[in-house]
Image (cartoon, rainbow, N blue to C red):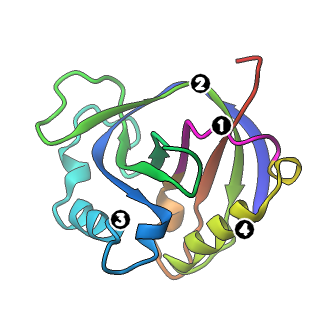
Amino acid sequence: MNKIITQLPEIKLVGITTRTSNAAEFNPDTAKIKSMLQRFFADNLQDKILNRKNPGKIFAVYTNYDSDENGEYTYFLGEEVTTFENVSQGFEELTIPVQNYAKFTSNPGQIPTVVIDMWQKIWQMDNTTLGGKRAYIADFEIYDERSHDHNEAVLDIYIGIKNENI
């Protein structure tokens, strides 16, 4: 898992959401993300998003945190758009503000194992190792052409970090 510190401009996304927590996601009876992912891809929801900036580049965003990784958050699944004009019914808009990030790129691995392993390593990091104090505004995973092979997937996880200069 490689890490760099980077800043990204504002990102406009359209997709679907659910409210959950890590505790809920580790319990098969209360997990929501897996069924949301299945619905997103089975119903080809990404193809119903208008004004897609990079078709096929999926954002899985963790936002609206109650506290930190131990509290509830909103899980958003969708794609970046050029404009919020004509958003289809059933979809929600999300704007991620300009933010600094610790960007982690995985080694090739099987989904979901590679994702879970990355998050567990990130949760163990102190602020120095992470590259800054977590902002808990928006963190996200990006799934693109590198993650199409679910047995050898490579993905990026962006962890928002605080910066007083933004």
Precedes in sequence: disc 4 or disc 3:
3
Please provide the residue range marked out in magenta: 131-140
Quick check: marks 4 and 3 in contact, CB under 8 Å? no
Q: Number of callouts in the render?
A: 4
Q: Secondary structure at mark 1?
A: loop
N-terminal of the pair, mark 2 or mark 3, is: 3
**Residue 4 picture location, percent across and down:** 79, 47
Tell me, for residue 135, which label it has, or none.
1
* Residue mark closest to the camera, 1 vs 2: 1
Question: What residue is shown at x 19% (from left), y 68% (from top)?
Answer: 42
Nearest to viewer (mark 1 / mark 4): 1
How far apart, in angstroms, are the residues tagged by discs 1 and 2?
12 Å
Name the amino acid, label 4: Lys
Amino acid type, residue under disc 2 in the picture: Val
Q: Which mark is residue 121?
A: 4
Q: Read off the residue under disc 2.
A: 98
